[in-house]
């Protein structure tokens, strides 16, 4: 009986160490999705080597975001709009991740990101997709019309 | 030993001095009499501003509002009570004389912005060139800034959005307002969507420029003709100035 305990006592740390090693072995690596999921970028060459971008693109974006936003010091090489313009196809759709460069890889690696809650998910030259049919001009006219009725566009102020 | 002593002494002196200095400025925990400015404006650099001549602003014309919302992708969601407004037309009537004005009101880009003072996450900030913006990465949507703003210039986004403009990210749960077309400023352009639209329509009621540059058109016009700011009594020193009100 004691021999069993001793054996368990010896093997437990080894087992834990093994588990920790197993758990950490996946860290720091980014698994690229199958080539069929990776849309071809439109530019000739990325702003940084592929392995750097794969591992550190979020650090580059995060690091330079405050400089750009708070001080207007923008680096065109590391701009978010630049990434989307080059990598995302004009016909991509965020709801179908396989068509969208960023979403395909994030979906595959199960990493959630919030970028596209505010930033547009499509390049500047994207064509209007049918599922987003609200025309901007029409919408602005509606906006202006709505505000002239009851709510505070065209505020009337009388100076006594 | 002696060197140890002197080191301790100077450290103690330093700590006592620092504590006294802090106590002098502290009223209660977290409440301070003085606070260092978050991002000091650069007196040598530009300060961007607008001058609006209300005598030239046509009653019923909404060219600036239309252009601003088009430029920045501000759409109606069919609910006028909560639709974002970056710029609005205000009609003023002097009851004594019946004289009427019409003028656009947007974020006034104050030098001492109340929205920056109240922001708990430092998301509302003023750039060194005087543009007041919301950093949506850190905005938690508390809307303190909307209440602090005397010009009612800010809007809250209530619903999830799609099809934003690449240069104007906008998202649910954050506050937004006129950015003085900061994307154009950073590209080196020296005009805004509203000014461009006003000039295109031939009203020439708005001028954009550098308030710190004595030779700029806006500075010369401000020097030669009288101008005022809305709620000048609050001493916020807005970068948007008006003539004729």
Image (spheres, coloured by chain):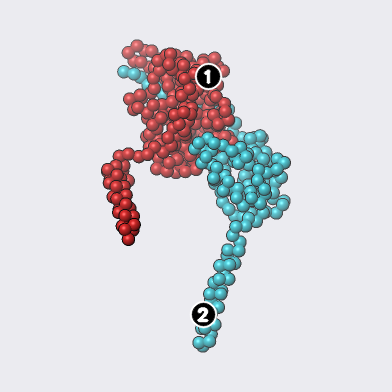
Chain colours: A cyan, B red
Question: Between residues B241 and B173, which one lies in front from this camera angle?
Answer: B241
Q: Check the residue under mark 2 and report the chain it is in.
A: A
Asked if both marks, 2 and 1, belong to the same chain, the answer given is no
Residue indicated by mark 1:
B198
Residue indicated by mark 2:
A9
Question: Between residues A113 and A20, which one lies in front from this camera angle?
Answer: A20
Expressed as whole percent of the image width and height from the top left, the position of residue B191 reads 54, 24
Please tell me which residue is depicted at 50% across the width and 43% down the height of the picture. B137
Secondary structure under badge 1?
helix
Expressed as whole percent of the image width and height from the top left, the position of residue B174 reads 47, 40
Crowd band around label 2 with a 10 angstrom C-alpha radius: few (<14), some (14–19), many (20+): few
Tell me: A66 left or right of B99. Answer: right
Secondary structure under badge 2?
helix
Say if residue B5 shows up in the picture. Answer: yes
Crowd band around label 1 with a 10 angstrom C-alpha radius: few (<14), some (14–19), many (20+): many
Please tell me which residue is depicted at 31% across the width and 47% down the height of the picture. B18
Q: Check the residue under mark 1 and report the chain it is in.
A: B
Decide: is B102 above or below A7. Answer: above
Tell me: B31 left or right of A59. Answer: left
Label 2, label 1: how far apart the Cα atoms are: 82 Å
- Where is residue B193, by image quadrant? top right
Expressed as whole percent of the image width and height from the top left, the position of residue B96 reads 32, 13
Please tell me which residue is depicted at 45% across the width and 31% down the height of the picture. B42
Decide: is B122 above or below B4. Answer: above
| Farthest residue, direction front | B2
């Amino acid at each position: 009986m004691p021999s069993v305990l001793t054996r368990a006592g010896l093997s437990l740390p080894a087992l834990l160490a093994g588990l920790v090693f197993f758990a950490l072995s996946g860290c720091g690596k980014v698994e690229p999705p199958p080539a069929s999921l990776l849309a071809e970028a439109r530019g000739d060459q990325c702003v940084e080597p592929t392995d750097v971008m794969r591992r550190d693109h979020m650090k580059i974006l995060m690091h330079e975001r405050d400089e750009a936003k708070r001080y207007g010091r923008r680096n065109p090489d590391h701009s978010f709009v630049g990434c989307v313009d080059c990598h995302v196809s004009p016909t991509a759709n965020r709801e179908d991740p396989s068509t969208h460069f960023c979403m395909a890889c994030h979906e595959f690696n199960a990493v959630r990101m919030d970028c596209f809650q505010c930033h547009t998910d499509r390049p500047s030259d994207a064509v209007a997709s049918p599922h987003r049919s609200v025309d901007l001009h029409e919408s602005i006219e509606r906006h202006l019309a709505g505000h002239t009725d009851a709510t505070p566009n065209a505020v009337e102020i009388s100076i006594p | 030993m002696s060197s140890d002593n002197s080191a301790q002494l100077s450290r103690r002196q330093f700590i006592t001095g620092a504590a006294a200095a802090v106590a002098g400025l502290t009223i209660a925990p977290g409440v301070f009499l003085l606070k260092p400015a978050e991002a000091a404006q650069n007196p040598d650099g530009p300060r961007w501003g607008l001058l609006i001549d209300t005598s030239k602003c046509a009653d019923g014309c909404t060219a600036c509002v239309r252009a601003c919302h088009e430029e920045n992708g501000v759409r109606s969601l069919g609910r006028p009570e909560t639709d974002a407004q970056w710029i609005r037309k205000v009609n003023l009537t002097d009851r004594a004389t019946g004289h009427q004005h019409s003028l656009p009101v947007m974020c006034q880009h104050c030098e001492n912005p109340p929205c920056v003072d109240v922001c708990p996450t430092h998301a509302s900030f003023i750039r060194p060139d005087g543009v007041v913006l919301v950093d949506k990465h850190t905005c938690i949507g508390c809307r303190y800034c909307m209440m602090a703003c005397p010009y009612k210039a800010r809007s809250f986004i209530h619903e999830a959005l799609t099809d934003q403009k690449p240069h104007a990210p906008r998202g649910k749960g954050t506050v937004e307002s006129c950015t003085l077309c900061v994307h154009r400023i950073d590209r080196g352009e020296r005009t805004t969507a509203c000014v461009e639209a006003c000039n295109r329509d031939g009203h020439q009621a708005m001028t954009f420029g550098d308030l710190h540059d004595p030779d700029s058109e806006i500075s010369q016009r401000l020097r030669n003709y009288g101008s005022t700011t809305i709620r000048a009594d609050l001493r916020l020193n807005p970068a948007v100035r008006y003539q004729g009100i």
